[in-house]
Amino acid sequence: METKLKILGFAGSLGVGSYNKALLRATTELFPESTTLEIFDLDGIPPFNQDLEMDMPAKLKEFKPKIREADAIEMHH
């Protein structure tokens, strides 16, 4: 049984019409079928503040496990 390579992708630009987000979406056509790309929207993640580490925002709680589960990360900025 073939294991799929899991890639987590995100764009540093948060704008709706971001070229980086469009480029990220377009890359899915280049991956082989044995690869999955999950695109995560960073909108809602505040700048790093260690004081909030114990009570982190919900969006960050959603993002951190996705990073751990991914085999690779693709970022466009």
Image (cartoon, rainbow, N blue to C red):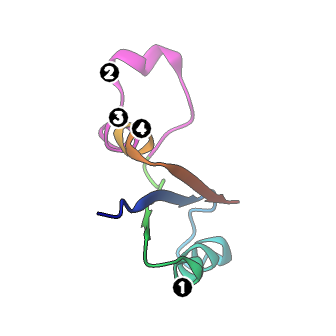
Q: Are marks 2 and 1 in contact (CB under 8 Å)?
A: no
- Whether the magenta-drawn stretch holds residue 21 is answered as no
The residue that label 3 is drawn on is 57
Residue 16 x %, y %: 52, 75
- Whether the magenta-drawn stretch holds residue 47 is answered as yes
Instruction: Classify mark 4: residues with Cα within 10 Å, few (<14), some (14-19) or many (20+).
Output: few
Q: Amino acid at mark 1?
A: Glu
Predominant secondary structure, magenta span: helix
Q: Are marks 3 and 2 in contact (CB under 8 Å)?
A: no
Query: Which numbered disc, 2 or 1, marks the residue closer to the eye?
Result: 1
Mark 3: secondary structure: loop
Report, in whole angstroms, how far the alpha carbon at label 2 lies from the one at label 1: 38 Å
Q: Are marks 4 and 2 in contact (CB under 8 Å)?
A: no
The residue that label 2 is drawn on is 55
User: Residue 68 — which label?
Assistant: 4
**First reached walking from the N terminus: tag 4 or tag 3:** 3
Vertical position of residue 74 compared to residue 71: above or below: below
Q: As drawn, is 7 to the left or to the right of 74?
A: left
The residue that label 1 is drawn on is 29
Name the quarter where the C terminus is drawn.
Answer: bottom right
Residue 39 x %, y %: 45, 64
